[in-house]
Amino acid sequence: MPVTHNNNAKIGQEIGEGRGVLIIEKERCKGCQLCIGACPRGCLKLSDTLNKRGVRSAEFYLKDRCTGCALCAVMCPDVCIEVKKNS
Ligand code: SF4
Ligand code: SF4
């Protein structure tokens, strides 16, 4: 089961092979897609469902391809993404 952390709107999902955790605050996401364009591995897409803001939020779906580079987190203008890499 990929869900490892859940408080309020934050749900963390394991990055493949125990590399860490990626958290997207889906309810704050405005669906601008900047993170999706920034990911060099194509790991993010828009959700099929709407969040409380009425937009399709970013979704982490290709977890095994993620390197934990955090470019998505750096790119998000609203700081909705957090990447916690295992050392
Ligand atoms: S951490 Fe890097 S590889 Fe993983 S989803 Fe974000 S941009 Fe893509
Ligand atoms: S960059 Fe941030 S606000 Fe924009 S879609 Fe990604 S998570 Fe949502």
Image (spheres, rainbow, N blue to C red):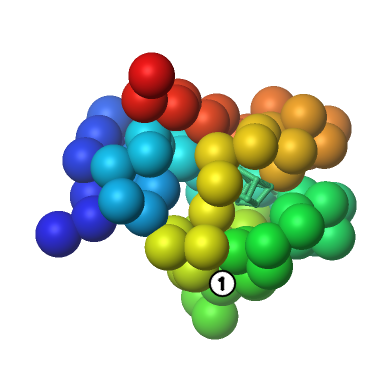
Q: Quadrant of residue 9?
A: top left
Work out which quarter of the rendered image holds the N terminus and state it: bottom left
What residue would you read off at disc 1?
A: 47
Indicate the amino acid at tag 1: Ser
The spot of residue 23 in percent (x, y) is 46, 38
Residue drawn at 30 percent across, 51 percent down: 17
Q: Secondary structure at mark 1?
A: strand
Q: Is residue 46 left or right of residue 36?
A: left
Q: Is residue 1 left or right of residue 16?
A: left
Residue at the extreme bottom of the image, as rendered = 48
The spot of residue 34 in percent (x, y) is 85, 52
Residue at the extreme top of the image, as rendered = 87
Residue 56 higher or lower than 79, as above or below: below
| Residue 55 appears in the rendering | no
The spot of residue 26 in percent (x, y) is 53, 49
Residue drawn at 52 percent across, 31 percent down: 83
Residue drawn at 56 percent across, 46 percent down: 67
| Residue 79 appears in the rendering | yes
Q: Is residue 29 left or right of residue 19?
A: right
Residue 67 higher or lower than 48, as above or below: above
Q: Quadrant of residue 58?
A: bottom right
Nearer the observer, 60 or 64: 64
Q: Is residue 72 left or right of residue 5?
A: right
Density class for disc 1 (Cα within 10 Å; few <14, some 14-19, many ≥20) is some
Residue at the extreme left of the image, as rendered = 1
Residue 17 higher or lower than 18, as above or below: below
The spot of residue 81 in percent (x, y) is 60, 36
Nearer the observer, 48 or 81: 81
Work out which quarter of the rendered image holds the C terminus and state it: top left
